[in-house]
């Protein structure tokens, strides 16, 4: 009996840990993609104004992408 409980708790912990790691990796990849898109758009030369614009837009872009991924149940496994 206790072995079944322990196995269930381990499975829940592993699943939530794996989901957390996946979310962090996804956010890192989305950030990298957004920054690379900016670099490509401005021929790898970013002015201070462009960097300021990027830093303002990035949180909103990540939030929208995360919400869309959640709506489409990317993280429900």
Image: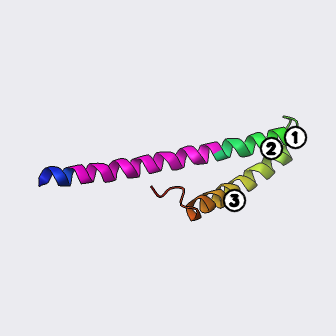
Instruction: Estimate the x, y position of residue 59 in percent, counting from the top left.
Output: 67, 55
Whether 76 is drawn above or below 47: the answer is: below
Q: Residues within 10 Å of mark 3 (few under 14, many from 20)?
A: few
Residue drawn at 79 percent across, 45 percent down:
51
C-beta proximity under 8 Å, tags 1 and 2: yes
Q: Earlier in the sequence, mark 3 or mark 1?
A: 1
Q: Is residue 24 left or right of residue 37?
A: left
Quote the CA–CA distance across marks 3 and 2. 15 Å
Which residue appears farthest toward the bottom when viewing the image?
A: 71
The reply to whether residue 47 is in sight is no
Q: Which residues are magenta?
A: 7-29
Residue beneath the point at 60% across and 48% down: 27
Picture coordinates of residue 25 (x, y %)?
A: 55, 43
Is 35 or 65 nearer to us in this picture?
65
Q: CA distance from mark 1 to mark 2?
A: 6 Å
* Residue 76 position in % (x across, y down): 47, 58
Q: Verify CB contact (< 8 Å) between mark 3 and mark 1.
A: no
Q: Main secondary structure of the magenta part?
A: helix
Residue topped by disc 2: 38
* Sequence-earlier tag: 3 or 2: 2
Q: Which element carries disc 2, helix, strand or loop?
A: helix
Say which residue label 1 marks: 42
- Locate residue 7 relative to residue 1 in the image: left or right: right
Mark number displayed over residue 60: 3
Can the viewer see residue 34? yes
Any mark on residue 76, and which? none
Queried whether the magenta region covers residue 15, the answer comes back as yes
């Amino acid at each position: 009996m206790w072995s079944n409980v322990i196995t269930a708790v381990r499975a829940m912990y592993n699943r939530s840990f794996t989901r957390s790691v996946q979310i962090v990796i996804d956010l890192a990849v989305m950030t990298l993609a957004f920054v690379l898109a900016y670099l490509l758009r401005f021929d790898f030369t970013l002015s201070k104004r462009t960097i300021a614009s990027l830093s303002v837009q990035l949180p909103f872009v990540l939030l929208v992408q995360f919400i869309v991924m959640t709506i489409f149940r990317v993280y429900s496994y």
